[in-house]
Image (cartoon, grey):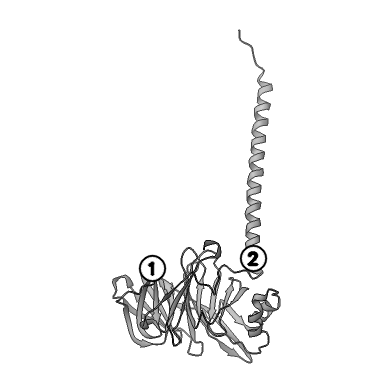
Amino acid sequence: MFYKTDVSYVLPIVSLKNSVMITKLILLLAVIALLAWFWQCRTAQKVQTGDFLYQINTPTKTFNLPPDLEEISGICFTSDGRKLAAIQDETGYMYLIDKQSGIVEKDPIFFAEKGDFEDIAVVGDVAYIVKSKGTVTILNGIASGKPTIEQADTFLTKKDNIEGLCYDKKTNCLWFASKGQKEGDEMFKNVYSFDLNTKQLNPKPILVITLALLQTFLKKQTSERFDALKNDFLKETFLKLGPSGIAIHPKTGEIYIISSINKVLMVFNRQNELLTMVKMDKTIHRQPEGICFDTDGTLYISNEAKGEVAQLHVFMVKNAQ
C-alpha cells in the first residue's frame, strides 16, 4: 500500500537543512579569515616592535673565500638559484659560488680590466654591475661564459658613491644604494631606481635615510638590544652611516640595507618607514659589503677579508633552523 506524502512539509525541512549548512560554512570561512587577519597583524606587530627574522650575529654556516675574493664587494643569486654571483672590487671578473658548499668555480667570467666595481644583480641571463659613480656595466649572455658587454650611464657621480645594488622584481628595476650626499648640514643616504625597460635612472629617490629618521625610531625602542644603536646614533649630529649593500626580501618585500660604517642592518618598507635595526657584531661582520636572499628567505652576507679571510655567512630564518 502506498501513502501520499505532502511535499509542502518536506521542502521546508530540506530547505532548512541547506540553510543551516550554508550558515555553518559562512561562519567557518569567517573564522578562517579572522585567524588569517590576526596572524598578519601579529606578524606586523612583531616587526614594528623590533623583532627580527634572523640571528644576525650567529650564522647558520660560514664559508671562507679564496684570496681572489678578499675584497668581495657584492653578491646576488643567479637566475637558477643554485649559485651566487660575486664581484671583487677593482677587478673585472664575475665569480660563481656554489650556495651549498661555498666552493668558488675556477674560471670566472671576465668583463673588464679594472674599475671601481661595487655590486652585482643578475636578471635572467644578464648581469648588471654598478660602479661607485653610478655607471652600469651590462653583461648579456652570462650563461655562455663570454657575454657581450655594454654600458649605461646615469646622472650620478662619485659624490653619490654607489655601493649597493639589487633587483626589484615587482617594478623590473635595479635599486642603487648611495653612501650619501650632503645638503646644508644634513647628510642623507638615497636609494634610486633604474628602469630596465628604459635604461634610465629615476631622479627622485625611492628611499631616503636621514639621521632624524633613525633617531625617531630609536627613541621609541625600549628593548636592551637597541642600546648599542642608541649609543651610535642618538648623540650624533652627523649621520655616520654608509650603505654598502641592499637586498629585497623575497617573501615580505621589505628592503634590507647593511652599513659597514657603524655595523648596522636596517629594514624598511616601501613607504620609507624604518621597521627595525640590528647591530652587527664586528667580530662576525668585519666589513659587510654584500647581501642577498635565496628564494626561501635564507639570508647571505659577505664580508671583505680586512687583513684576515673573506667570508660568506649564511642565516636561515629563526623558526626554520
Badge 1 or badge 2: first in the primary sequence = 2
**x, y percentage for residue 98?**
37, 70
Residue 199, visible in the rendered structure: no
Please, what secondary structure does the residue beneath circle 1 have? loop
Rendered residue at 64%/65% (across/down): 46
Q: Residues within 10 Å of mark 1 (few under 14, many from 20)?
A: few
C-alpha gap between disc 1 and disc 2: 34 Å
Label 2 sits on residue: 46
**x, y percentage for residue 69?**
38, 81
Question: Of circles 1 and 2, which is in front?
Answer: 2
Q: Is residue 176 left or right of residue 185?
A: left
Rendered residue at 61%/75% (across/down): 277
**x, y percentage for residue 88?**
39, 82
Marker disc for residue 124: 1
- Image: 12 above or below 146: above
Residue 211, visible in the rendered structure: yes
Image quadrant assignment for residue 311: bottom left
- Disc 1 to disc 2: CB gap under 8 Å: no
Q: Is residue 253 left or right of residue 146?
A: right
Quarter of the picture containing the N terminus is: top right
Please, what secondary structure does the residue beneath circle 2 have? helix
Q: Residues within 10 Å of mark 2 (few under 14, many from 20)?
A: some
Q: Nearer the viewer, residue 85 or 191?
A: 85
